[in-house]
Image: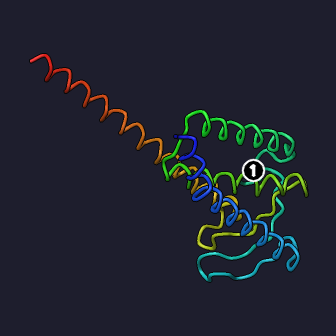
């Protein structure tokens, strides 16, 4: 029964989010990469976000540059763990599937860049925060997806403790 519900949640929530966001990431990268040069800047939302074409060979702020193979390997491992957890725990909570779709889109979007180009194509930059790293739609997906996953975990912990306290109260009421 839970496997059917799991598959339904995946197909209705996670898969569409994954496909839409991965497409947005790859299309935006392709359009900007083919129309602008590395280092070129263009205003997008004046005073808020501009477009700056960067080829990032590392992670945020270019840390760990030259470790592309490690990032690809870790992405495969992380996706494997995520899929295993989803299947083994039969997670059907809608928030989890939103997080799953976003995390998969972000992870795979950047992994495709790493495999195809040897770097990640970044282009979004906060004008008001010049030291913040340039990022892309995949990074936004990962950030929001991980945030949603953390909220999901907190909700599950709260639910667990509420259930545990409810059982303890039931035991106390049965002994009186």
10 Å crowding of disc 1: few (<14), some (14-19), many (20+): some
**Residue at x 43% of width, y 42% of height:** 154
Residue that lies at the very extreme toward the front in this rendered image: 1
- Above-or-below relation of 8 to 132: above
Where disc 1 sits, the SS reads loop
Residue sitting at 20 percent across and 26 percent down? 170
Image coordinates of residue 81 in percent, x first then y, are 68, 36
How far across and how far down the image is residue 80, in percent? 72, 38
Res. 110 image quadrant: bottom right
Residue 123 drawn above or below residue 152 = below
Picture coordinates of residue 48 (x, y %)? Answer: 59, 76
Relative to 154, is 37 above or below?
below
Q: Which residue is at 30% across, 35% downward?
A: 162
- Taking the view exactly as shown, the residue that stands out farthest to the left is 176
Residue at the image point whose x is 64% and y is 62% from the top:
16
Seen in the image, is 48 located left or right of residue 65? left
Q: Which quadrant holds the C terminus?
A: top left
Q: Is residue 86 left or right of residue 70?
A: left
Q: Nearer the viewer, residue 139 or 159?
A: 159
Q: Nearer the viewer, residue 9 or 79?
A: 9
Instruction: Report the residue marked by disc 1.
Output: 59
Q: Residue 43: where, in percent of width, then height?
A: 70, 82
> Looking at the image, is 114 positioned above or below residue 45?
above
Taking the image as drawn, is residue 135 in sight? no
Q: In terms of image quadrants, where is residue 49?
A: bottom right
Colouring scheme, one of rainbow, by chain, secondary structure, one colour: rainbow
Q: Quadrant of residue 11?
A: bottom right
Regarding residue 168, the answer to whether it shows in the image is yes
Q: Is residue 18 left or right of residue 146?
A: right
């Amino acid at each position: 029964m839970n496997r059917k519900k799991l598959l339904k949640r995946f197909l209705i929530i996670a898969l569409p989010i994954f496909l839409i966001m991965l497409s947005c990431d790859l299309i935006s990268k392709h359009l900007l990469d083919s129309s602008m040069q590395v280092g070129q800047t263009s205003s997008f939302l004046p005073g808020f976000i501009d477009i700056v074409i960067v080829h990032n060979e590392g992670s945020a702020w270019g840390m760990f540059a030259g470790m592309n193979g490690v990032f690809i390997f870790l992405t495969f491992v992380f996706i494997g763990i995520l899929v295993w957890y989803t299947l083994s725990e039969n997670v059907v909570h809608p928030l989890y599937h939103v997080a799953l779709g976003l995390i998969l889109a972000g992870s795979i979007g950047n992994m495709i860049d790493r495999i195809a180009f040897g770097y990640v194509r970044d282009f979004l930059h906060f004008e008001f925060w010049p030291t913040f790293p340039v990022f892309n739609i995949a990074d936004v997906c990962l950030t929001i997806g991980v945030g949603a996953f953390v909220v999901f975990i907190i909700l599950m912990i709260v639910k667990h403790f509420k259930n545990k306290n409810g059982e303890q109260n039931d035991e106390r009421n049965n002994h009186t």
